[in-house]
Amino acid sequence: MNKNFQQAFQNKTRSADGKPGADYWQNFGKYVMDVTVAPPSRIISGSETIYYYNGSPDTLHEIYFRLVQNAHRKNAHRDSKVTSGYFTDGMNIISLMVDKKEKTSALKIAPGSNGTREFIHLDKPLPPKTSVEISVKWNYELSEDSRSDQPRDGVIDSTTFFLAYWYPRVDVYDDVNHWDQTDFTELQEFYNDFNDYDFTIHAPAGFVVWSTGELKNENEVLSGMLSGKLNTAQRFDSTIHLITEKDFASMKQLVPSGAWKYSAKNVTDVAFGISNHFLWDAGGVNIPGSRWGRVSVQSAYAVDSKDFQKEVDLGKKCLRFFSDSLPGVIYPYSKMILFNGNSFMEYPMMVNDMSDPDYDDWVATTAHEIAHTYFPFFMGINESRYGWMDEGWAAFNELNYSRYELDSIADWVFTNFYVPHNLKKARKKLTSPLMTESTQLKGLPYEFNSYGKPALAYEALRSLLGDTLFKKCLNQYMLRWNGKHPVPYDFFNTFNDVSGKNLNWFWRAWFFEPNYFDLEVKNISVNGNSASITISNTGGLPVPFKIQVLAESGIETFYFSANEWESKKEITVQVKTKSKIQSVRLLHGVFIDWNPKNG
Ligand SMILES: [Zn+2]
């Protein structure tokens, strides 16, 4: 355990049983914002007042800001390929006031930062349990091209925009690392405080806005007929087409005014899309236990999109599945908007997905982005450092939903997407332990450690604990850390605590050691209708496996959980069939073996 984590346990902000410590704290901002967007102009301008509360026991002498738009500057360091249309001048801070005092010229780029972190020294330090008022006026040019390698925001077409990371925000100051010093490099996506947002989006008449948050004035921005339809849609199971192609000629009557007022409480971010020629569908889904009863599911999409016609139906099924089955936690918001942009990205209450012509991939990626509702938004995950705590669960929950929707092909869809197929190359490059900080990894090693490998770790953990106990542990972890910032040890400790088992051997093998996937069949001995199989775990990862036996009476399959590897590197398992055994083989399932020659 590194020094920062040790300190957190000593300071009682974290505890050995995995619960938030007695002295756990976090900081918080109340954001009141105004933004103007008027396509086809790409200038986005806004103003905001942040009431930033210092919940820490420390006196803060600086405030660090996160200005993600600065990743678009030509000279900014990035970890993904971009096209020329990606470049802009970044966020232009017109003025910055602290407690009503002019501080614009005091804003400086943080040492070593690519420009996405800037800071000011406070004239008057901010003591514990006090607030500071920060007012910012800003503008930036929206990226012309949202089709870069990792597109997250930008122009979809000349009058359709998607805006993410669009406002200056205060960086996270936490109990483990203090100010978050990871830059935004277009690889990791989120580590944010839970804030309250009240904001107004000024858009021209005729443009619809789809945003995170509760729309407070739908009677003003939408025609009576349109707001009536939106409300009706939430109450019924069938999908209602709010805006069809026929409506494009009368958009200014349907959407007469352009000051869209939103409120979003206790969320980590807000994003929005805007268009004057997107189709708009809506439906409702009953989520038992939800404080809203029925959740509104909406989609906004291009006329030529082939898959978004069914997007509301798929979204509703995902919300039900994630609420009822796994993770089995009630969908926490009043709505989910599925926006047809150029990305595969998640935001609180929103997904920004490009169309996907392949049915199976469409199901899997939509489920994946919706699954992010829980990680990193229900739980305030530090994805910048630990991608596996966020993307790993999204990939795992995607796999679960795919198995429900796509049956037997789901495992293939998962491994095809998340497990490297060039195994020879993979073995050399992909053995970094999961605890390796995400900022240390690029390319395939980053992807594998953030998505495929942790999803498989959770799958192995489920095999070890069984469905019921696994879900109980996961639910406790989520309830304990909802609205907070868990670190890896809170996850390990909660599962140890709730399961009543010491799983440290499992955590060590999966998260701390440079292990890989390789089970080696050492010996098979068959005696009539029984067989004993000796298997060596050469790769070192505790994975479940199956033994498939072809006997005279047919095929029989025997399942062995990851528990087999608790204290042994080599095991001998026995199987007994109803009739004489003809052949025996080891099956890996989704845990694709990196050395298939030895079994
Ligand atoms: Zn994801």
Image (spheres, rainbow, N blue to C red):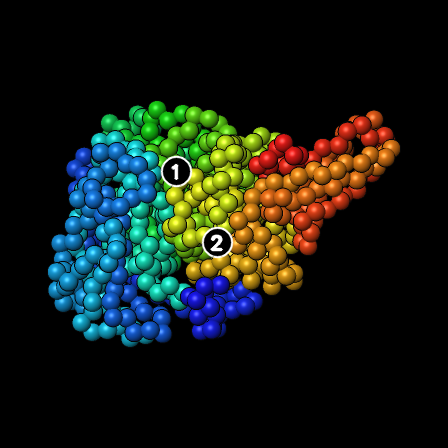
Q: In front here: 175 or 541? A: 541
Closer to the chain start, of discs 2 and 1, is: 1
Q: Which mark is residue 142?
A: none
Q: In front here: 109 or 595? A: 595
Query: Would residue 37 be visible to someone looking at this image?
Result: no
Q: Residues within 10 Å of mark 1 (few under 14, many from 20)?
A: some
Q: Residues within 10 Å of mark 2 (few under 14, many from 20)?
A: some
Residue 273 percent coordinates (x, y): 30, 40
Q: Looking at the rendering, which quadrant does residue 497 occupy?
A: bottom right
Residue 414 percent coordinates (x, y): 53, 35
- Give the CA distance from mark 2 to mark 1: 25 Å
Query: Would residue 426 be visible to someone looking at this image?
Result: yes
Which residue position holds label 1? Answer: 344
Q: Are the residues tagged 2 and 1 within 8 Å (C-beta)?
A: no
Query: Is residue 237 positioned above or below 464 on the image?
Result: above
Q: In front here: 235 or 374? A: 374
Q: Secondary structure at mark 1?
A: strand
Tell me if the residue at label 1 has its CB under 8 Å from ligand 1: yes
Residue 141 relative to residue 503: left or right: left
Residue 275 relative to residue 460: left or right: left
Amino acid type, label 1: Phe
Quadrant of the rendering where the C terminus is positioned: top right
Which residue position holds label 2? Answer: 435
